[in-house]
Image: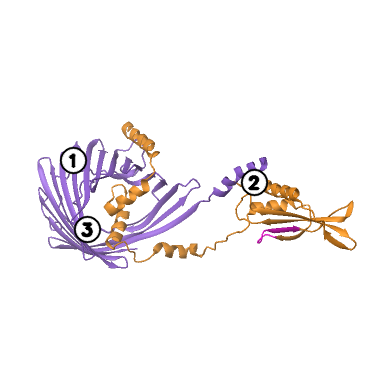
Amino acid sequence: MLKTFSLLLAFIFIYSCSNNHESNMAKLDKTFGCKDPHKNLSKRKMRDCLAKQRAGGESLFDLTDDFNKLIGQDSTVIYQNSVNPYLWNAGLEVTKTYPLKIADNQGGFIETEWIRETNNENHRCLIKIQITSPELITTGVKSNFLCEVKQGNEWLSDGKEYAQEEKQITLKILDIAGNLAKTSL
Amino acid sequence: MKKIKYLLSAIPAALFATSAQADISVSGSANAAYTDAGGNASATYGGGVSFSMSTTTDAGVTITGSSAISNDSDSVGSSSGATGITALTFGFSGGSITIGGDVGTPDGVGKVGELVGYADDNQVAKTPVVGLTEDEGDGISLSTSIGDMSLTAVYVYDGLGGGNVDGAANTAGGASLSMAIGAGTLTLATADEDVSGTNNTEFGASYVMDAGGGTLSLGFTGTDGDTAAKEGEAVSAAYSTTLGGATVAIGYTGHDANNKTANQTDVTFSSPLGGGASIFAEYTNVSGDIAASTSTKDSTVIALGTSVSF
């Protein structure tokens, strides 16, 4: 018993050094076929293997395919979401205090209504957020900050760039998305 | 910047986390054969369907179990049955570990010339039979590779299949190693058995190489231990080739144990018919120190049959 266990322990140690087992087994399969001494086939599996080997590797039916049809596995519909859910939810979180004009989760687009300051009725801004990636990557979100000023009865662009504000929005979205991803693991 | 660094550290885990994937494969075979042993004709038929269920863990370990509905296809008596999953195989990138029933020791490696699977059903027994008998049961098997060498180690802790890890009457163990040498593949194996206190050890070696458009196999088996009828050597050889799509093989094995000798000559033929079907023919003859022929058994047996792979 001790001898056997010592052998097994040594084997496990050696095992950790191995990295080409699959290619070695493929070579042995080619050489020995069903009688590969390392296959350890039961009597039943050996019968199946020999029958297939005699038939030149062919099978009468594709039982696996038929079985999958029977249990409905082949009718799987693959849905590929083009919008990363963490970034999307983070975008909603960032804009949750404002009324939303557009929230298109298929296109990954969020746009707020015009946001006005109570002490400055002649100035308004809105936020546009576009989620551009199905993956959680730092370049997967774009933010725009647009502002207008009222001149007479018309609202005109204030002509300013809000790069710092846009950066803050993007970083906030990424921060929240990272936390959401971390807590979902 | 800190936030970006933090986010970057969180991204890989989110991107590379994978969910478990389950897979079911179904396979099987059916066989029918006519066997003639000195005028005693028999029919054998059977087969089965195997279900193999596997899944892959998040860490990339493949776990496989299989069950079957079967009918013994190589003996006259019909033995139907359904089995649940009796063993689990854990597949890693560097090898695999199997735990459960039907784990076999690497015995018989050197008997490369014993080819028939049906024709020996009604054949008289050889008096000297070199090799082990306790070769399968509940146990653990590990398989891996070192460089180009493939290694398998097996320990059968209960040869009677009772799941007794530390107190079974029948136990067995062994190891085998295969490597490419010259133009062929050399396999060395050792196996030992303890059958209710009767101990025997087998050493087997085989060398398989391409020769003359076919495959030449040479083998040696040596057994040492408590059973005199097993204690001795066996030499074996086989040659197989293809002829117009059919496979023809001839094998010879000579047993020499306890001052008695017996020889077995096998010839097999098989041809695919397409669609997973094939026909086969087997011939086997034993001579030397063998049991006397009876009304049902003979030294020379032929079998003709067909098999279908699903």
Neighbor class of circle 1 (other Cα within 10 Å; few <14, some 14-19, many 20+) is many
Circle 3: element type? loop
Query: Magenta segment range?
Result: A104-111
Q: Classify residue B85 as left or right of residue B124.
A: right
Q: Quickly name the residue at label 2.
A: A178
| Mark-to-mark CA distance, 3 and 2 | 65 Å
| Residue sitting nearer the eye, B96 or B229 | B96
Residue drawn at 60 percent across, 42 percent down: B9
From this viewpoint, which residue is outermost toward the bottom?
B274
Q: Quickly name the residue at label 1.
A: B222
From this viewpoint, which residue is outermost toward the top?
A2
Question: x, y percentage for residue B91?
Answer: 41, 47
Q: Which chain is purple?
A: B
Residue drawn at 46 percent across, 65 percent down: A69
> Residue B136: which disc?
none
Q: Amino acid at mark 1?
A: Gly
| Residue sitting nearer the eye, B288 or B165 | B288
Q: Quickly name the residue at label 3.
A: B118
The answer to which quarter of the image holds residue B162 is top left
Circle 2: element type? helix
| Residue sitting nearer the eye, A111 or B39 | A111
Q: Quadrant of the N terminus of chain A?
A: top left
